[in-house]
């Protein structure tokens, strides 16, 4: 059997599965469909929940050379507001010297007009990063700048490690007349 014949046989064998996978009558076809779907869902879920897995973790989080030591992956979180809920999604915070920068997305339901997106930068001194390595809670300060109008909010964070590379984090966003506090978890991944 040559390559062309093999391709024709494969096409004939898989055609019912591709046209109408819900009508596959053989056990083998159902098994193949199930395995393919499970693999696809597994890959998507893995990449969504562990976006930093392409790089291997290092031995020390604190980097004395001042190079980016790591990035923080923050889990989505929410907090109640009067008559609704505020949800916060923070993108990966990339380290550069003692500053970690990323994007954030704040959605306030049902007050959609209060939604905002922008950039978030946090300062974590090397001494604090070493304390974090030792399992000691540390504070970080920073700011959030909206993309829409450049409005700046002060942000304070408290990181409490539970393991060497993960823990809980509390963010306090302070504006002119509001303060929103979010509790979440973090994972840090070496560069």
Image (cartoon, rainbow, N blue to C red):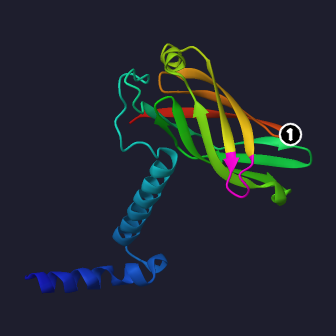
Q: Which residue is mark 1?
A: 178
Q: Residue at x 39, y 78 (%)?
A: 17
Considering every residue shown, the one lying at the far front of the view is: 150
Percent of width and height locating residue 86:
78, 47
Identity of the residue drawn at 68% across and 53% down: 117
Q: Residue at x 28, y 81 (%)?
A: 13
Name above or below for residue 48 compared with residue 112.
above
Q: Is residue 51 magenta?
A: no
The residue positioned 80% from the left and 52% from the top of the image is 108
Q: Position of residue 61 (x, y in %)?
A: 43, 24
Q: Nearer the viewer, residue 115 or 40?
A: 115
The residue sitting at the right extreme is 83
Q: Quadrant of the N terminus?
A: bottom left
Residues in magenta, as a range: 145-151
- How packed mark 1 is, by other alpha carbons closer than 10 Å (few <14, some 14-19, many 20 or more), is few
Residue farthest left in this picture = 1
Task: Please tell me whether residue 19 is drawn above or below residue 75 in the rendered image.
Answer: below
Looking at the image, which is closer to me, 24 or 158?
A: 158
Could you say which quadrant of the image residue 66 lies in?
top left
Viewer-proximal residue among 79 and 8: 79
Picture quadrant where residue 14 is located: bottom left
Secondary structure, mark 1, is loop
- The dominant secondary structure in magenta is loop
Q: Position of residue 45 (x, y in %)?
A: 49, 52
The location of residue 190, given as percent across then percent down, is 40, 33
């Amino acid at each position: 059997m040559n390559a062309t014949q093999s391709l024709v046989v494969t096409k004939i064998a898989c055609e019912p599965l591709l046209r109408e996978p819900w009508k596959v009558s053989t056990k083998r076809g159902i098994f193949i469909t199930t395995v393919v779907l499970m693999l696809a869902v597994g890959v998507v879920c893995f990449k969504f929940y562990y976006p930093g897995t392409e790089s291997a973790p290092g031995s020390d989080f604190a980097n004395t050379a001042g190079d980016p030591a790591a990035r923080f992956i923050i889990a989505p979180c929410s907090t109640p507001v009067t008559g609704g809920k505020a949800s916060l999604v923070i993108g990966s915070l990339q380290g550069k010297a003692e500053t970690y920068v990323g994007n954030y997305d704040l959605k306030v339901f049902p007050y959609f007009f209060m939604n905002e997106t922008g950039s978030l930068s946090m300062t974590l001194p090397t001494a604090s990063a070493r304390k974090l390595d030792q399992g000691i809670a540390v504070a970080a300060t920073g700011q959030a700048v909206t993309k829409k109008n450049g409005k700046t909010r002060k942000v304070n964070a408290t990181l409490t490690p539970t393991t060497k590379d993960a823990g809980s984090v509390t963010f306090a966003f302070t504006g002119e007349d509001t303060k929103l506090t979010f509790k979440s978890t973090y994972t840090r991944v070496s560069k």
